[in-house]
Image (cartoon, rainbow, N blue to C red):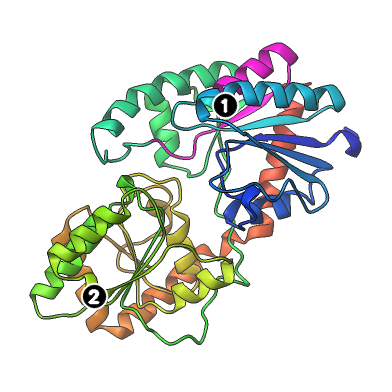
Amino acid sequence: MNAGAENLMMLSGDTVLATGRQGVFFGVLQELATHFSRIDVISPRPDGPTVTRSLFGNVFLHPAAGSRLFQVGHILRTAHALLAERPYLILTSHDYGFFYNGIAAYLIHRRTGLPYLSEIHHVPGHPRPAGLRERLDLPLNRVYARFAARHAVAIRVVNRVEMPDLLRSFGVPAAKVRVIPSLYLDTEVFRPLPVEKQHDVLLCGRLVRNKRFDLALEAVGLLKDEGRRVSVLLVGDGPLRERLFQLARALGIASQIVHERFLATAADLARAYNSARMLVCASTSEGGPRVTCEAMACGVPVISTPVGIMTELVRDGFNGLFFHWRAGELAEHMRTLLDDPALAKNLGAAGRAAVLPFERRAMLRNYADNLKALAREARP
């Protein structure tokens, strides 16, 4: 295929890029822009004023102006206008929630023949539901995955064990599952830094139910009851913010928490990781989780639930610690790392070694190569 035709269309759930903030997706597009002639990203309404519509000279953003109720229509109108102007190799669809991206991707494919890749990074409620909504999500995801397997060129998953096993249990043929990791780690930014340890525990992520920050706070509360004052840096924002601080006040640990709603750059985040003695991930479902891997790249010891790619990366007691959604077990691991700095240092060093193969440029080159290969498979 000639390079001039190497255009990529992406249906994204990102609501940050158009506001000018540089989240994870910014770095992904920055590297992908070197592998494609042009990239068009169609996304929902931003969570703030739209200030950016293009990046890096060849990436163009097409955020919606209205509600997600009308997102399928926005995607179809935008995609057909773009396709009238130029050809595209492939369409990628980030599929989650009510699958408006996936529905639109299928309709575009049916009308134009453009091949699409369905990306299902994780399924809410697996391996453990965070509530009734996620229990109901599982059968919905089963139906959607089987639908996508019939129409998409492939379904992308980002870990090698958890998601392929789940999709096979849904009835998705193994040949339709493509493992393309999404751990794009800038190991020049995320690395050990000579930063003072100001916090005992770092919690980082969107403040939503599946992250189970409440469980982490309960563990800190248990340590407080023992007479230990454990300092916490909480980085993130979301709908559960007030509820979490109500819990912290009830546990008597609110004064031990420093809260940063948003850190502007990857360098800021790297300094936050390095300022903590450990990072805790209490999630019930994840594709990555990315923050755990970034902390590992910084040489910070991690305590995680066995979710997503963690079961592949972490050897319990060697390069990290696992716990199984019990506050008492988490408190015990926190106590161990605080009381044994040598163990914490060894876990951190081994953790960094485990994630170094996920260097950003190599991983994104692999993603781009897979997209081009899938486009060739769809159009022999």
- Secondary structure under the numbered disc 1 in the rendered image: helix
Q: Which residue is mark 1?
A: 71
Left or right side of 76 for 357 = left
Q: Residue 255 shows which numbered tag?
A: 2
- Are the residues tagged 1 and 2 within 8 Å (C-beta)? no
Left or right side of 366 for 199 = left
**Spot occupied by residue 117 in the image (x, y as percentages of width and height):** 62, 29
Q: Residue 129 shows which numbered tag?
A: none
Q: Residue at x 83, y 36 (%)?
A: 6
What span is colored magenta in the figure? 102-123
**Spot occupied by residue 258 in the image (x, y as percentages of width and height):** 34, 73
At label 1, the amino acid type is: Gln
Q: Crowding at label 1, few (<14), some or many (≥20) Cα neighbours within 10 Å?
A: many
Residue 18 or residue 203, whichever sits in front: 18
**Spot occupied by residue 170 in the image (x, y as percentages of width and height):** 39, 23
Q: Image quarter for residue 313?
A: bottom left
